[in-house]
């Protein structure tokens, strides 16, 4: 049904031959690409995906509330399935108990761990055969945000604070940065089920290490195929394993950020690369493999676009507030 909704949207766009080369949110123009050399996407990605994901998240949370008869006071308007409604619902629930979703979504968590264990078991272990969910999102922030600002912000307490509000599919995030700048995160979030048929995989995982990567294809480094364009400064990149509660690694998260200089026509931009490299599921039934590498990976790439845009706008707002405080 959600797939139908997105297909419907693209049909409307093509029927009207409307070509939107960029999307604008909060006065910032964004350009989305699925890889570095790909053309800019011509339909708006963020709002359509966020709305479709919000319907699913809203219904799942409502069902959990209704089944357990807990947090019923948070469900003030069940017919509102918008992103704003799911953000308000989640915030009301965690205001009572920051760990609420680990209980409310316990069934989803165990089903998801089983799903990813299956993907791992039915995959070649060679990292060079892994497959990416990834996107490049460029936001024309001008002076409001730089690449260094964004990299710093993602490891700050602010990023955890707004986590529930940047994606309907986010349920928990807690990050600890150590003295050497290394980070540990615990995360509960879902992906899938909007563009793919496996359903939303609400997954409880940690990123126990999140460090500056080396792509040298040898022990301790990552595959050379995972390296990105040299315009991305290695120091503004991090990579870390996504580890399930049973200790298995389900994939590797790689984030990079760079400045794009202003031109005669454009203010300066911050370009963010986000990728998760997954086991290829190449030993699964061919229909499941196909579903995974096409629709599932597309699902998670779209999820990333929502999050990058909302995070970037929040980061810019935090820096604006901080500089106002400094000036005051
Ligand atoms: C966007 O820009 C317009 C015109 O400069 C301004 O009125 C409006 O408040 C801005 N909106 C945001 C969200 O910054
Ligand atoms: C990058 O995107 C283009 C256009 O969508 C596609 O033809 C190409 O295969 C992609 N390259 C990689 C490495 O995914
Ligand atoms: C949960 O219960 C409320 C109140 O009875 C109802 O309006 C809503 O439709 C229910 N939601 C789901 C997903 O069943
Ligand atoms: C590859 O990179 C890793 C991590 O930096 C390092 O430990 C290892 O020595 C490197 N291997 C080679 C052959 O350079
Ligand atoms: C979530 O994961 C953490 C650590 O990986 C684990 O301690 C906790 O029990 C898990 N919770 C659930 C509900 O699976
Ligand atoms: C950036 O500049 C190019 C070349 O002039 C133009 O085609 C493009 O629309 C501009 N993008 C933005 C977001 O202003």
Image (tube, rainbow, N blue to C red):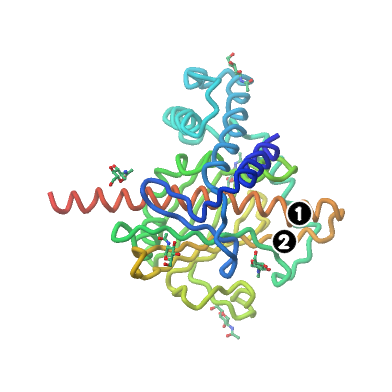
Q: Which mark is residue 270?
A: none
Residue 157 visible (yes or no): no
Residue 61's place in the image compared with 72, above or below, is below
Mark 2, Cα crowd under 10 Å, few <14 / some 14-19 / many 20+, is: many
Residue 96's place in the image compared with 260, above or below, is above
Q: Secondary structure at mark 2?
A: loop
Some atom of ligand 5 lies within 8 Å of the CB belonging to the residue at label 1: no
Mark 1, Cα crowd under 10 Å, few <14 / some 14-19 / many 20+, is: many
With 80 as the anchor, is 4 left or right in this view? right
The residue at the point 65 percent across, 54 percent down is 247
Q: Position of residue 212 (x, y in %)?
A: 48, 71
With 67 as the anchor, is 151 left or right in this view? left
Residue where numbered disc 2 is placed = 279
Residue situated in front as seen by the camera: 230 or 7: 7
- The reply to whether the C-beta atoms of the residues labelled 1 and 2 are less than 8 Å apart is yes
Q: Which of marks 2 and 1 precedes in the sequence?
A: 1
The residue at the point 54 percent across, 20 percent down is 78
Q: Position of residue 209 (x, y in %)?
A: 52, 62
The residue at the point 61 percent across, 74 percent down is 222
C-alpha distance separating marks 1 and 2: 7 Å
Residue furthest to the left: 328
Residue where numbered disc 1 is placed = 119
Q: Position of residue 40 (x, y in %)?
A: 55, 61
Residue 251 visible (yes or no): yes
């Amino acid at each position: 049904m959600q797939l139908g909704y997105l297909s419907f949207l693209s049909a409307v766009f093509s029927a009207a031959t409307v070509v939107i080369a960029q999307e604008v949110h909060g006065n910032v123009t964004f350009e989305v690409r699925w890889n570095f050399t790909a053309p800019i996407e011509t339909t708006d990605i963020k709002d359509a995906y966020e709305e479709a994901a919000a319907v699913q998240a809203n219904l799942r949370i409502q069902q959990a509330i209704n089944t357990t008869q807990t947090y019923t006071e948070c469900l003030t308007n069940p017919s509102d399935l918008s992103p704003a409604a799911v953000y308000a619902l989640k915030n009301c629930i965690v205001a009572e108990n920051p760990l609420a979703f680990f209980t409310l979504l316990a069934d989803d968590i165990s089903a998801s761990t089983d799903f990813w264990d299956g993907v791992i078991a039915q995959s070649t272990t060679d990292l060079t055969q892994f497959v990416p969910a990834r996107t490049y999102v460029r936001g024309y922030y001008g002076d409001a945000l730089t690449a260094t600002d964004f990299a710093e912000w993602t490891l700050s307490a602010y990023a955890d604070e707004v986590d529930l509000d940047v994606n309907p599919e986010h349920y928990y995030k807690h990050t600890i940065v150590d003295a050497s700048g290394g980070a540990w995160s615990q995360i509960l979030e879902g992906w899938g089920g909007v563009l793919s048929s496996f359903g939303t995989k609400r997954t409880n995982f940690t990123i126990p290490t999140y460090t500056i990567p080396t792509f040298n294809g040898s022990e301790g480094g990552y595959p050379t195929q995972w390296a990105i364009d040299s315009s991305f400064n290695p120091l503004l990149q991090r990579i870390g394993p996504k580890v399930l509660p049973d200790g298995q690694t389900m994939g590797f998260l790689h984030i990079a950020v760079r400045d794009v200089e202003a031109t005669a026509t454009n203010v300066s931009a911050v370009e963010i690369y986000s990728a998760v490299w997954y086991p290829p599921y190449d030993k699964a039934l061919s229909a499941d493999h196909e579903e995974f590498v096409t629709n599932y990976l597309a699902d998670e790439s779209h999820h990333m676009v929502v999050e990058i845009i909302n995070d970037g706008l929040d980061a810019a707002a935090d820096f604006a507030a901080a500089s106002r405080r400094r000036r005051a």
